[in-house]
Image (cartoon, rainbow, N blue to C red):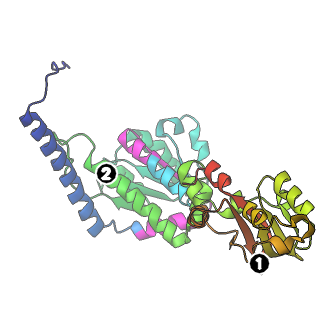
Amino acid sequence: MHSQPMTDPTPEDSANSIAAAQKVLGIEADALRYLAENLPADFAAAVETVLACKGRVIVSGIGKSGHIGRKIAATLASTGTPAYFVHATEASHGDLGMIGSDDACLLISNSGETAELRDIVYHTQRFSIPMIGISSKADSTLMKAADHRLTLPACPEACPIGLAPTTSTTLTLALGDALAVALMERRGFAPKDFGVYHPGGKLGAQMRSVADLMHSGDALPALDENAPMADVLLAMTSKGFGVCVLTRDGIISGIITDGDLRRNMDGLMERRALDVATKQPITVAPDCSAPEALAILNGRKRTVLIVAEEGNRLVGVLHLHDLLRAGVV
């Protein structure tokens, strides 16, 4: 293959590139619309098979189908359906041991004749493991062996010579997403469940709750509402929050902040804690989301939130810095 010397693109070159991109996207968009209106007949049955699976969904494919399969497995696993990608060639050299009798297999081959999938197909038949096939060829070897057939529509590939997997891989990926989302809805998969599988990075931070980040137990800057002010000052400085939460038998009755101290400087040390405190402080529940807590702090121009459970009972405190360290923005 000989590369052409690089030259500055002409307006005609740029126009041709844009036209090519628009043509590809149009072809693939049309195919996706067709698939949405003509879902494979076995789609609902495939969902039921996965829901009944006591193990994992084992996904496999070769080449571009393998790349798409890895993404489908990752999407399933992150949305409540245990899944794992097994390389078809490696399966023939020992990795078949990763596929158990409680699993289900999702095998992908555009032609349906991928030789490397043969041993996995035999394995599913030998141990009565449910198998779902994705292929463009309904009468292929793979689809004849499958318990459930997710046949892709016969839409043209978007590449100009009609050979490079383009439309077919887009359809396969979209069908995998459709399967994952259908399973999410059947399982009642909620945002809090999503957070369990995405603890890292910005996404994980947004899914965390106040209970995940708050301070509790001995770390709490809390005293009885009748405590002397000397104890209050010690709690405010030693606990590192700059506040002291006041309680009566564990029930929140007030909070003392730096501002409360400044407003009550005259005779401060002769007063009891509740005389200095701000009554009915802002509280949030432990299951409040981290972004919501940050919005409250920003809106009220505060740095600390009190965390209370039912009955206004103190369970924790949350500092603005806790949210920022966790990546909540």
Question: In this view of the protein, which residue sits in the foreground, 169 or 106?
Answer: 169
- Label 1 Cα neighbours within 10 Å, binned few <14 / some 14-19 / many ≥20: some
Q: Residue furthest left?
A: 12
- Residue at image point 68% right, 72% down: 282
Q: Is residue 51 magenta?
A: yes
Q: Is residue 240 left or right of residue 34?
A: right
Q: Residue furthest front?
A: 266
Q: Nearer the viewer, mark 1 or mark 2?
A: 1
- Give how far across and how far down residue 298 sits, in percent: 57, 62
> In what element is the residue under mark 2?
helix
Residue at the spot of label 2: 170
Which portion, as a residue range, is magenta?
44-70
- Above or below residue 288? Residue 311 is below
Residue at the spot of label 1: 312
- Give how far across and how far down residue 151 sits, in percent: 32, 59
Q: Is residue 151 left or right of residue 191?
A: left
The reply to whether residue 135 is visible in this rendering is no
The image quadrant that residue 305 belongs to is bottom right
Which amino acid lies under the numbered mark 1 shown in the image of this protein?
A: Asn
- Give how far across and how far down residue 213 sits, in percent: 70, 57
> In what element is the residue under mark 1?
loop
Question: In this view of the protein, which residue sits in the foreground, 268 or 74?
Answer: 268
Q: Is residue 325 magenta?
A: no
- Give how far across and how far down residue 217 sits, in percent: 85, 61
Q: Is residue 11 left or right of residue 329?
A: left
Which amino acid lies under the numbered mark 2 shown in the image of this protein?
A: Thr
